[in-house]
Image (spheres, rainbow, N blue to C red):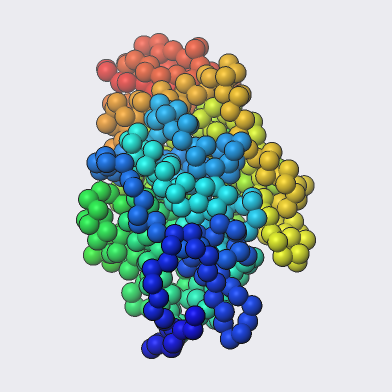
Amino acid sequence: MAMSPLARGYFATEAGLPDSGQAYQYVLNREPPRPDPLSRWQPAGVYGPSAVCFPERFAWPARSWKGIARSDLVIYELHTGTFTQDGTFAAIVPRIEALKELGVTCIELMPVGEFPGTSSWGYDGVFPFAPQSIYGGPQGLQRLIGECHARGMAVFLDVIYNHFGPDGNVFPRFGPYLSDKTQSDWGPAVNYDTKGCDSVRAMVLDNVRMWVRDYHVDGLRLDAVHALHDKRATHFLEELSAEVDALSTAVGRPLTLIAESDLNDPRMVTPCESGGLGMHAAWDDDVHHALHSAITGERHAYYCDFGPMSVLAKVLTEGYLHDGTYSTFRRRSHGRSARHVPGFRFVVAAQNHDQIGNRPEGDRMTADQLWLAAGLLLTSPFTPMLFMGEEWGASTPFYFFTDHFEPHLADGEAERREREFVDFGYDWKAPDPQDEESFLRSKLNWDEIADDGHVSLLGWYRDLIALRKAYAELADPRLDRVRADFDEDARWIVVHRGSLRVAANLGDFSARVALKRGAVLLASDENIHLDGGELHLPARSVAIVHITG
């Protein structure tokens, strides 16, 4: 069926409404047929034909879903393919109740746009409108979201608007979707400010509308927004923020935009009317780095400025370490103070897909380390995020894995990955990302949750989240109300949260910390006790104390 040219490079034709599932492709200038880059469904994968899909016709359960307030978010990041052995949207559903019992209020799915092969983190997706077919496709995702909402749980999606994957990417054949002037770390950047960019920006906004209106998602985590190249007067993130706020009013529930940004710039989360970019929250890696370095002792690469108790105290009270200070890793000053920003605008984690998966062995924190990390993380003034399996100390690694079809991509992925981390101080002995075992070994083993050690850690996470919800002081986002005392040599820290004290001993010897009279509400070690106004903390332990005197 021939198409006729319209203004601004568009082509169109008129036809009857096709049936759902009908296959179609485009032929450009007598080239081989290609799938639709804006396809809603790719049942045969990235190299197969597109299929007609009407996600707006899905029959949602007749329940009133009002969403989750941003200040109540406890986020759980998961990768659909490795969260369960089946690796599908449907297989997540039986686990929702356990997450709710844990205290999680929102799951965040790593990218689900159609990617090549059967195993990927999702950041090499090439069909941003088409939910991954092997996960269950459009209806599988809609059923999952419906089931989450029925149980009172929000759903966020991780989306990539800074680049497309290299394998199966047909966007360059259909228009100026990629910039010929700017590059990202993953290839040509998406075109937000050069010729033809109006249509590209409109396409991305259409994608956002689809997720909200047709899939009922509650928020989007925007990958690497520092890699969005836009020199126009109205930055795309500002345009996106205005659109999402309008959508929120239209659908009658909170919608949240979370930016992954390494800029340490509070303007990212400053409302547009106050001169900011209007993101509702941002990942705060400084908190992760401070926790990880203080607990594990690692100081390589970007951890080099982290580790001292003074740094841990600063990030737990101010959000950023680098707020205009010199960054040794970057070899320049970095960041800006965010002490005036409400704490819930920063999403913090002891572990996430990057911080585990970017290690050559894909190794997680140990259970002993997680007792400490969780105690400080879940009592912080920030929005906490857990990574799948963390709550019981999962022993399975989370490797980086891919399944490229193109031989040059498949053969070179391991070497490319090693080059990416050449300056990070690792002895790089990572498994080949293309080896199926890298994917299969990353799947969670839910059977181990029944072991005594895992059960105890799971109970600790549950109790901490319950305590956070029971005491308003722990959810208070005002950073000027948070204070911390510490001893650099003894390696203990006490964080003041209203009438509560979060005391942690990260050292290898027991410590005695002077506190006012009170009661221990929660403790990681049975030997923790309060004697008068002195708290006895064994090595590597943490307690939450209610001050009464």
What's the residue at 27%, 31% (across, down)? 472
Answer above or below: position of 472 versus 239. above
What's the residue at 61%, 36% (across, down)? 85
Residue closest to the eye, 203 or 396: 203
Residue closest to the eye, 241 or 7: 7
User: Residue 519 appears at what percent x and percent y?
Assistant: 34, 15
Residue closest to the eye, 480 or 248: 248
Residue 390 visible within the image: yes
- When asked about the image quadrant of residue 530, the answer is top left
What's the residue at 28%, 37% (across, down)? 476
Q: Is residue 373 left or right of residue 480?
A: right
Answer above or below: position of 395 versus 229. above
What's the residue at 50%, 76% (across, down)? 177
Residue 227 visible within the image: no
User: Residue 268 appears at what percent x and percent y?
Assistant: 37, 60
How many marks are shown on the rendered structure? 0
User: Residue 98 appears at what percent x and percent y?
Assistant: 45, 28
Answer above or below: position of 427 versus 368. below
Q: Quadrant of the C terminus?
A: top left
User: Residue 155 appears at what percent x and percent y?
Assistant: 39, 45
Q: Is residue 248 left or right of residue 415?
A: left
